[in-house]
Image (cartoon, helix red, strand yellow):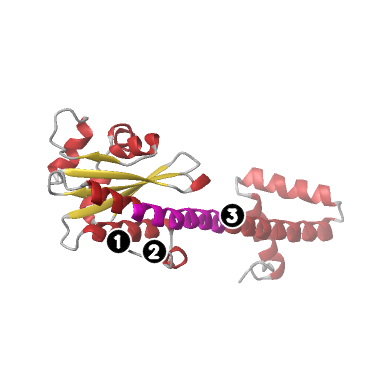
């Protein structure tokens, strides 16, 4: 069994984490490259992300229109039914046109397994094998166990990414607010005006120059002090 829990915090980005996960998933069944892995993730925003564990799968995803892939591929079926889906032979004429794409790359069998990631979004692991009918009942069971294990790690990584993004946004907002407040203080000192009047002056300068308010404030602080504004939130 592949342990991906340690990489939850080590990966530089959620995309890097997904790539590590799919690379490990591909090696889960074989080391000779006959089985490769990809992942479909759909976040709360509705944006869909496809990651491949190899250049072949990555290129395949890049060449597929996202909506086309979601609508016809087994990943959506797995997510809709909340159970794994198997295509034993991608050349079967009864399959939608999507299956012709992996078939053209030599992948005859596809196994899609939904991941349980709570409210973090929706995700499915997709395994692609060269032999026909590769994913036997036993291999399906093994893939399900693997998916159950990594599902928790995916949920943790998605939540960690959200927390990191929220922290960055909050820090940026606080830094901007501090710079603006400093600029307002400078205007009050120079013009002997109220805080509201100083803010109105700053806002008019922003609108007339078509420059963001925080940038106008930053420039004002730099002119007054000779150095860029320093906040308590700067590391």
Q: What residue is rendered at 80% in x and 60% in y?
A: 185
- The quarter of the rendered structure image containing the C terminus is bottom right
Boundaries of the magenta span = 145-166
Q: Tell me the quarter of the picture where residue 104 sits.
A: top left
Q: Are marks 1 and 2 in contact (CB under 8 Å)?
A: yes
Residue 42 shows in the view: no
Badge 3 marks a residue whose secondary structure is helix
Q: What residue is rendered at 26% in x and 44% in y?
A: 111
Q: Are marks 3 and 1 in contact (CB under 8 Å)?
A: no
Q: Are marks 2 and 3 in contact (CB under 8 Å)?
A: no
Q: CA distance from mark 3 to mark 1?
A: 29 Å
Question: Looking at the rendered structure, which numbered label has been put on residue 24?
Answer: 1
Q: What residue is rendered at 18% in x and 49% in y?
A: 129
Badge 2 marks a residue whose secondary structure is loop
Nearer-N-terminus badge (3/1): 1
Does the magenta segment cover residue 80?
no
**Of 117 and 204, which appears nearest the observer?**
117
Residue indicated by mark 3: 166
Q: Is residue 85 left or right of residue 105?
A: right
Question: Looking at the rendered structure, which numbered label has been put on residue 158?
Answer: none
Question: Looking at the rendered structure, which numbered label has been put on residue 4?
Answer: 2
């Amino acid at each position: 069994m592949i342990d991906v829990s340690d990489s939850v915090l080590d990966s530089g980005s959620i995309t890097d984490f997904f790539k590590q996960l799919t690379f490990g998933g591909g090696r889960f069944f074989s080391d000779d490259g006959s089985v490769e892995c990809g992942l479909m993730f759909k976040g709360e925003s509705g944006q869909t992300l496809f990651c491949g564990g190899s250049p072949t799968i990555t290129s395949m995803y890049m060449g597929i229109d996202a909506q086309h892939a979601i609508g016809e591929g087994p990943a959506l079926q797995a997510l809709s039914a909340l159970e794994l889906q198997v295509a034993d032979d991608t050349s079967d004429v009864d399959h939608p046109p999507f299956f012709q794409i992996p078939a053209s790359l030599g992948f005859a069998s596809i196994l899609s397994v939904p991941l349980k990631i709570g409210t973090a979004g929706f995700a499915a692991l997709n395994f692609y094998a060269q032999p026909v009918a590769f994913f036997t009942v036993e291999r399906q069971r093994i893939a399900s166990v693997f998916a159950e294990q990594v599902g928790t790690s995916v949920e943790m990584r998605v939540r960690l990414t959200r927390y990191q993004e929220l922290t960055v946004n909050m820090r940026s907002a606080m830094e901007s607010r501090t710079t603006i407040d400093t600029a307002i203080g400078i205007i009050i000192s120079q013009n002997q005006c109220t805080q509201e009047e100083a803010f109105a002056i700053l806002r008019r300068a922003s609108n007339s120059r078509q420059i963001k308010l925080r940038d106008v404030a930053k420039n004002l602080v730099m002119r007054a002090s000779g150095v860029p504004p320093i906040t308590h939130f700067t590391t």
